[in-house]
Image: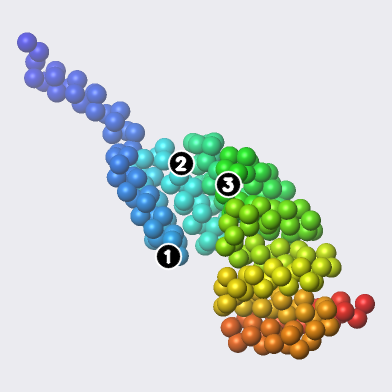
């Protein structure tokens, strides 16, 4: 018969590795989901608290690092976000959302080429995610690649016909390419999807202005201001449109 003391020591030796692994994976999942719920309502700091708890309970939970990284992006803490997203990808190289979020962080840090690399990988891993195409299109637009941006916005809209930001940004790309009529179609669809979308009214107003449809332009500009868009921004947009039209 084994000594009770020896048996207790053996049990303790068996339990030690389990404790060292970080705790309860089920409870970690609960905390992760709580973080996601706070993200849905814009509670970035509360979400981070929940992701912190999830990671303490399960340090191998890649999606908790990805979630915390995403929340940090919303708070403008891009370098800290990159650290979390790097760790998420190290733990789970197939996590498309982590590549997508890291692409956003790189874009916001002024590193669009690295952002595009991450968006490309995210698309490869999850080719049905409209948001990834939108983010890549947005970045390509900022890189001065309007045609390639339009191709991404086309795909984003095909996957999600309610993607109003994709319509708005595709309209901008058409405007850049000197296609105000097509731009107006996209801005109008964005407004149909969200009649309170002030920037879409302003953008459509600029497209009307390019076509010398000044009455319609003024009506949209007035609506944009009524919906709360900064009048100083509107003044700069009108000044730029006037300069373009006088060339």
Q: Can residue 50 be seen in this view?
A: no
Residue 128 shows which numbered tag?
A: 3
Residue 144 on image: x %, y %: 79, 58
63 and 202: which is toward the camera: 202
Mark 1 vs 3, N-terminal side: 1
Residue 217 on image: x %, y %: 74, 84
Identify the coloring: rainbow
Tag 2–tag 3 contact (CB < 8 Å): no
Residue 32 on image: x %, y %: 38, 49
In the image, residue 91 sits, relative to residue 153, either above or below, namely: above
Residue 41 shows which numbered tag?
A: 1
Tag 1–tag 3 contact (CB < 8 Å): no
The residue positioned 69% from the left and 48% from the top of the image is 116
Residue 62 shows which numbered tag?
A: 2
Q: Quadrant of residue 58?
A: top left
Task: Give the alpha-carbon distance from disc 2 to disc 3, as whole Å.
Answer: 21 Å
Task: Give the alpha-carbon distance from disc 1 to disc 3, as whole Å.
Answer: 24 Å
Tag 2–tag 1 contact (CB < 8 Å): no
In the image, residue 154 sits, relative to residue 58, either above or below, namely: below
* Image quarter in which the C terminus is found: bottom right
Residue that lies at the very extreme toward the right in this rendered image? 247
The residue positioned 51% from the left and 54% from the top of the image is 70
The residue positioned 8% from the left and 19% from the top of the image is 4
Residue 184 shows which numbered tag?
A: none
Query: Dot 2: few (<14), some (14–19), or many (≥20) neighbours within 10 Å?
Result: many
73 vs 43, left or right, is right
Label 1 element class: loop
Mark 2 vs 3, N-terminal side: 2
Q: Is residue 26 visible?
A: yes
Q: In which quarter of the image is residue 211?
A: bottom right
């Amino acid at each position: 018969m084994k000594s009770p003391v020896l048996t207790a020591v053996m049990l303790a030796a068996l339990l030690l590795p389990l404790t060292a692994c970080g705790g309860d994976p089920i409870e970690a999942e609960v905390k992760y989901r709580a973080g996601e719920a706070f993200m849905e309502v814009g509670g970035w700091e509360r979400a981070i608290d929940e992701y912190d708890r999830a990671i303490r309970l399960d340090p191998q939970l890649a999606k908790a690092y990805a979630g915390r990284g995403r929340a940090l992006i919303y708070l403008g803490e891009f370098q800290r976000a990159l650290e979390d997203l790097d760790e998420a990808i190290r733990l789970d190289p197939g996590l498309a959302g982590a590549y997508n979020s890291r692409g956003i962080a790189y874009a916001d840090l002024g590193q669009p080429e690295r952002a595009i690399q991450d968006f490309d990988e995210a698309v490869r891993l999850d080719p049905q995610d409209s948001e990834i195409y939108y983010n890549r299109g947005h970045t390509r637009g900022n890189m001065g690649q309007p045609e390639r941006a339009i191709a991404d916005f086309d795909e984003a809209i095909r996957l999600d016909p309610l993607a109003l930001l994709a319509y708005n940004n595709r309209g901008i790309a058409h405007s850049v390419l000197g296609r105000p009529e097509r731009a107006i179609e996209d801005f109008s669809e964005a407004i149909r999807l969200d009649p309170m979308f002030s920037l879409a009214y302003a953008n459509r107003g600029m497209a009307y202005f390019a076509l010398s449809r000044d009455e319609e332009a003024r009506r949209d500009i007035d609506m944009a201001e009524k919906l709360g868009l900064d009048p100083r921004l509107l003044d700069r947009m009108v000044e730029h449109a006037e300069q373009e039209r006088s060339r």
